Amino acid sequence: MESFQNPYGATLNRSQSLMSGLEKTSPTCNKPTHSRSSSTASSRHSRNIKDWEVMDDLQVDVTSGDNPQDLTIPGICEGYLLKRRKWPLKGWHKRYFVLETGILRYSKTQQDVSAHSLNYIFLGKLHGSLDVSLAVMSINKKSNRINLDAGDILYHMKAKSHDLFYIWVTKLSAHRMFKKNEAAQVHNGFLQALSQGTSVSSYQHYQSTTGSYMGEIAAPTLSEFPSVNPGVNGKVSAWLQQTHDPDSCAKELNRCQLDLSELNRLVQRLQSLEGGQQTFTNGELQRIISMQNLSLEKPKKSRSGKIWGHSRTMSRVEALGMLSSSHLNSSSQLGASVPSLPDYVPYIPDYVCSQLSPPTNTSAEGKKIQQDICTVSQRVHTSLKSVHEALAQERQRLQDTYHQSTKLAEVRVHTFMETGLVYNRPMSSRRTPSVTDSAAEYFDANDDVLNGSSSESDESGLSNRTTSNSEPEEGHASATREYRASISKAPNSVVPKNTGRRTTLPAHCPENAHVGLMQILYNNIGKDLSRVSMPAALNEPINLIQRLCEELEYSELLDTANNTQDPYQRMVYIGAFAISGYATAHYRNRYKPFNPLLGETYECLREDKGFRYISEQVCHHPPISACHADSDNFSLWQDQRWKNKFWGKSLEIMPTGIVNVTLPRFGDHYEWNKVVTCVHNVLSQQRYLEHYGEVIIRNLNSNMCTCKITFVKSRYWGSDTNKNEVQGTVLDQTGSVIHRFGGLWHEGIFCDTFPTPQCIWKPNPQPKDYYLYYGFSNFALELNELTPGLKPLLPPTDSRLRPDQRMLEDGRVDDCDKFKEEVEDMQRERRKQLAKKGQEHKPRFFKKAVDSSGRDVYLTNGTYWKFRENPGFANTNNLELW
Ligand SMILES: CC(C)CCC[C@@H](C)[C@H]1CC[C@H]2[C@@H]3CC=C4C[C@@H](O)CC[C@]4(C)[C@H]3CC[C@]12C
């Protein structure tokens, strides 16, 4: 593998194609024991995967650490990129990105950002921020896509052109390198200080020189605070009176302004002195791109007619010559951190070229001007520093006050709830619910979201909406805090004391921290996880078709819905049910359900809950699990298919099936989609699950109301308290909000627009020692129970009879591994036989159909319970799966 010298002096390997790793995975060599998934994966998919490259981690020589260039801060890069929407899964938002000192931030528009300070200030809402050195970076040259996966945060970005893509990749690589060096340096300084037994002053010194950007991630930005209520003038003046010398900041800033005009004059003078004599040496280009501040947007003509950065304009010819492929490919000694782009001569727009010119200073007069620039700059720096300090103090005060006031508000709302002061709102008024004063405070911020726009995107697939992309909103966060407080006060649902079912598993779950998940995942990139066989220690003794049944754990919500006259309130229960299915995921991130075999079935008869459920693995390619449940109060069916994507640190699971529920009493037929589930930090023990996106629930038989539920993506700076947020609204035909509800998907849902505000749903408490039993809930514990009475009634294809799964449940992990392999081999053999005969597998209890929207679906064919009763599965022809 070629190795290069990057602009900062460190040696690194050329980006390594992930696919090359995959290609090596032939059946004979390098194949891990547990990647026996089918090699006939969709060719389209694998072609796409081939185009992705993971940027190698840069090798930083920590020990030498004597290269002063190591800590040169690469120039800022800013401009619009497309950012993939979280919901709907297709389409991209245009977002304005700023990359500065290793931190990538973005907001909605360029106007949200101001560069008129030492650091970038986000005037509008800062949507997100990421330390690029902590992320796995993968790029796709063909589609100009860049992914950054930091485990907790995952950005999918796309450049508008290949040239911009090239610049961004160069910049990102430089900033990653810088950040890594910086971390190494801090680490070194610290170690040195410790080993010398001196105080850590050198470390502190380092911190004070680089402190402006260190730790930025953790510090909340001003935009985090809710907007100020206009009716608080009195409070503001009182506040200002306490502010320490408010005029001094203004004075300093005035002084700065004068100095800045002086600087502007000096810079212009310097430029006119040096005009046009610049040439670039071979290989310097990437260094220049890395080091210069670049604005990748066409400048809007400012008053001075100039854009910031160096303003010498290069001719198109000059630019092309400079950016010829010889500069960009691997022969460049500096072109290390960027993948080579052979046969490609990018056209860098003039307004970017004009910023690329490196500073030069040769003449004596030039030197003098430079000195002046330094002196004035230092003055500006001192002024701004003092302003910065004053503002920091102010921010601290604000922050303290803010925290105090939210605590107060909480207390107030609690009292409001406790005193039972409820408000009645005529439902007929059908307008956005008004809330009482005490609650109004925190709902104000919600309104724009509550009245959110439609989820249609424009033709280009681009959108500037922020209402339905599951990005966090501060207003919601505070609403959720209130809901949460109320939910925790609500009594726990009473778990029936004795269901006669088991309350624990026969054996503890195996320890699996040692299992080399990394190799398995890297070797199966792009493949469905549902096709990848994993070591038994990574499995839970539950099958995916059983796991689907878990979504019925809170079926009483559907019972309630079927007994609720008011269609809007009914919808709230349906919404809560849709959310409740996700609750168990909170405790379930260490193990993966078994992949069902084609033709495997599972039944769940719950007289106590009043429903019966069946499911079958109906298709292998792609894997599809179909299920159907009936009760006096509802019918539910869905077929579940999911795609998954592994981005280096996180695994995204995108289910595509639609859930259907009918309520016999009102003739309602609801249908809704599922959200994305992301397993963050999948390779480490800090693994956790997040759901994000939007669920839209429609009633196909009445357009009276719809429900919109947002699973909010947590913020990077979020404490645990803003994880797992959900917000829902029930809208009438005109789009007005009739109900709103929210909370956390693992803690419960509160609705404050009901005649009596109340907790709609709260998950059952986890059983004792659940951690030792795969994190299962009581309901999950019961799913695989096989009682002597039940055994003869089940078809032999029922998951309860699957030996490998039973072995795992009994704690016989090695036996399970062996048997699992056998079972999977048998399945392959069956498939071969079928293919030989030119036949296709046909599901036994489901039939293929097309739903009202033209989607392929699997519906029950109504035979399961009939066969079970008569003639009984012992007397039918059954598949032999194991
Ligand atoms: C590799 C292993 C050990 C890491 C753990 C992966 C676990 C957390 C993954 C593997 C398969 C995943 C499940 C696959 C499909 C669905 C259906 C979807 O509608 C809800 C999420 C859910 C239920 C996923 C939850 C997370 C899940 C269980």
Image (cartoon, helix red, strand yellow):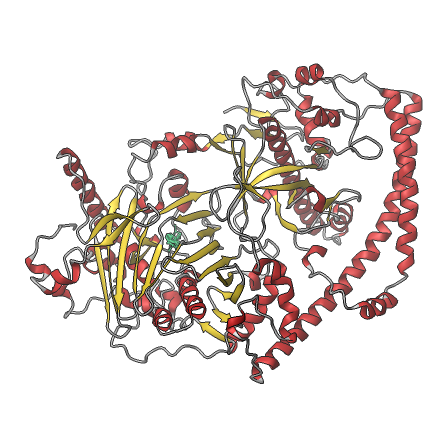
In the rendered view, tell whether residue 320 sits above or below residue 727: above
Residue at the image point whose x is 75% and y is 54% from the top: 199
| Occupied quadrant, residue 11 | top right
Where residue 712 appears, x then y in whole percent? 53, 57
Q: Furthest residue to the bottom?
A: 419
Q: In terms of depth relative to the viewer, which is nearer, 423 or 298? A: 423
Instruction: Tell me residue 639's x, y (percent).
Output: 30, 52
Q: Nearer the viewer, residue 512 or 698?
A: 698
- The answer to which of 835 and 100 lies nearer the viewer is 835
Q: Is residue 270 visible?
A: yes
x and y, in percent, of residue 142 in the image: 50, 28
The residue under the point 71% across, 34% down is 295
Side of 272 where 190 appears, left or right: left
Horizontal side, residue 778 vs residue 194: left or right: left
In terms of depth relative to the viewer, which is nearer, 772 or 434? Answer: 434
Left or right: 202, with 42 as reference point: right
- The residue that appears at 64% across and 71% down in the rendered structure is 440
Q: As drawn, is 342 to the left or to the right of 313?
A: left
Residue 436, image x, y percentages: 62, 75
Is 73 situated above or below 361? below
* In the rendered image, the vertical position of residue 261 relative to residue 558, given as above or below: above
Residue drawn at the location 45% of the way across and 33% of the way down = 18
The number of discs equals: 0
Give the image quarter of residue 63: top right
Residue 687 can be seen in this image: no
